[in-house]
């Protein structure tokens, strides 16, 4: 693809106007929105209002002027992005905390089913949380197997199949409906981690029959660093699953201050502590831009951006480990290189921000809301230049920072 062709695609891009809603720094091509989405202007304004007016002026009165309803209000904005009903979602806590709650609840349903099945190579915190969850339920175990062995690992003892919809390294995407059906055929619940899916690819939890799902909001949803996560519980399980973290915000009457715990109905029972309102404000501002997103246009643009970088990587001699079929992947592209960390650092110095995943993955996010075709074309040119000139061989690029 030529620069002129990339510019022609931008001229016809129905999403191009959305770029103006982001506070993007000059001189940077940001290909790490799959790890931390950029600041939105609406999010910045929402945080300022929350600090100056809601906290600064209204003080504690703000709890009765919208703060206390934030977990439900934001859930109504997340639900359409994951194919769930608004009353099946709640926003709060972290992805890890929500995953723990969902796993322990699933393990407690049937004493004859005490196994969590998951994939080796899953995002590590998911497996770490699963280890902690099974330790909290007598007789429970984690059965983590290679992807090729997942179906065989399901059995009469399986309580829940826990999978990440889009793989954090390769971007390989599971067929949600097919794997949910496999879990149900084995008599197990299906739990999806949507951290690399929400805002990146179309998600249809209810159409697939999923039981549970978790996900973060600081990647493609641009909620900000440490933004609150979301939890989905299918309506059919609302009165059968109980959260193991019985915090006061999950109480049926939190301000009755009763000694005994009585869970709230529906999704409110999954709340734990006080909502972090500054983070909630940033997220709510960012979520509002999704109200009128053209999803077919978004997925088509994601595929076009992928093709540009895939060709650049091929020309540079970099093996692509991401599926070439758009239906089989998320919205990032990964290349393998023995010095991938140093390569990523050399690109960052040249204004192309991506990231690295151990041991040899260069990962580049493709976020159609604010990236132009020209952006990605120029990133591909710099990738080829760096591969040809080999500045990544300089010793200074090999020193790893705390966050990679």
Image (spheres, rainbow, N blue to C red):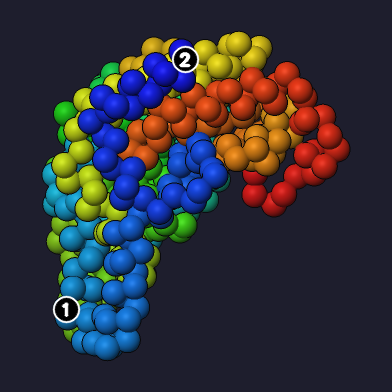
* Residue lying at 78% horizontally and 39% vertically, measured from the top left: 397
The C terminus, quarter of image: top right
Residue under numbered circle 2: 2
Please, is residue 204 above or below residue 104 in the view? above
Q: CA distance from mark 2 to mark 1?
A: 53 Å
- Expressed as whole percent of the image width and height from the top left, the position of residue 392 reads 77, 31
Q: Give the residue at the far front of this rendering.
A: 4
Closest to the observer, 176 or 117:
176
Q: Is residue 215 left or right of residue 270?
A: right
Please, is residue 124 above or below residue 43 in the view? above
Q: Nearer the viewer, mark 2 or mark 1?
A: 2
Residue 239, which numbered label? none
- Expressed as whole percent of the image width and height from the top left, the position of residue 317 reads 66, 12
- Expressed as whole percent of the image width and height from the top left, the position of residue 193 reads 38, 39
Tell me if mark 2 has few (under 14), some (14-19) or many (20+) residues whose alpha carbon lies within 10 angstroms of its own. few
Residue 247 in view: no
Residue 278 in view: yes
The numbered mark, 2 or 1, whose residue comes first in the sequence reads: 2
* Residue lying at 51% horizontally and 16% vertically, measured from the top left: 310
Closest to the observer, 259 or 362:
362
Q: Secondary structure at mark 2?
A: loop
Residue 328 found in image quarter: top left
Q: Give the residue at the far right of this rendering.
A: 395
Residue under numbered circle 1: 65
């Amino acid at each position: 693809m030529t620069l002129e062709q990339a510019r022609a695609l931008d001229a016809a891009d129905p999403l191009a106007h959305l770029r103006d809603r982001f506070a993007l720094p000059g001189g940077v091509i940001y290909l790490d929105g799959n790890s931390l989405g950029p600041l939105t202007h609406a999010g910045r304004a929402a945080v300022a209002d929350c600090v100056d007016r809601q906290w600064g002026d209204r003080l504690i009165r703000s709890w009765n002027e919208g703060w206390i309803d934030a977990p439900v209000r934001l859930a109504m904005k997340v639900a359409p992005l994951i194919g769930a009903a608004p009353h099946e979602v709640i926003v709060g806590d972290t992805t890890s905390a929500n995953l723990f709650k969902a796993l322990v609840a699933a393990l407690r349903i049937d004493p004859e089913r005490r196994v969590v099945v998951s994939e080796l190579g899953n995002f590590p915190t998911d497996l770490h949380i699963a280890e902690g969850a099974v330790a909290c339920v007598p007789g429970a175990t984690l059965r983590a197997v290679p992807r090729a062995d997942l179906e065989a690992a399901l059995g009469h003892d399986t309580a829940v199949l826990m999978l990440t919809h889009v793989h954090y390294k390769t971007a390989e995407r599971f067929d949600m409906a097919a794997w949910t059906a496999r879990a149900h055929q084995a008599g197990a619940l299906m739990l999806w981690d949507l951290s690399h899916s929400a805002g990146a690819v179309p998600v249809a939890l209810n159409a697939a029959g999923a039981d549970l799902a978790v996900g973060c909001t600081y990647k493609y949803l641009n909620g900000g660093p440490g933004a609150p996560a979301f939890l989905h519980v299918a309506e059919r399980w609302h009165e059968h699953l109980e959260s193991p973290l019985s915090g006061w915000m999950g109480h049926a009457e939190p301000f009755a201050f009763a000694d005994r715990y009585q869970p709230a109905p529906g999704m409110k029972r999954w709340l734990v502590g006080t909502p972090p309102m500054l983070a909630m404000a940033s997220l709510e501002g960012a979520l509002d831009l999704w109200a009128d997103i053209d999803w077919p246009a978004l997925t088509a643009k994601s595929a076009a951006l992928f093709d540009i970088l895939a060709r650049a990587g091929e020309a540079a001699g970099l093996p692509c480990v991401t599926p070439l079929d758009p239906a089989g992947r998320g919205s990032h592209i990964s290349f393998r290189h023995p010095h991938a960390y140093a390569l990523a650092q050399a690109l960052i110095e040249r204004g192309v921000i991506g990231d690295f995943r151990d041991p040899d993955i260069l990962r580049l996010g493709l976020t159609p809301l604010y990236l132009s075709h020209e952006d990605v074309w120029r990133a591909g040119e710099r990738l080829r230049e760096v591969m040809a000139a080999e500045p990544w061989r300089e010793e200074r690029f090999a020193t790893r920072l705390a966050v990679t």
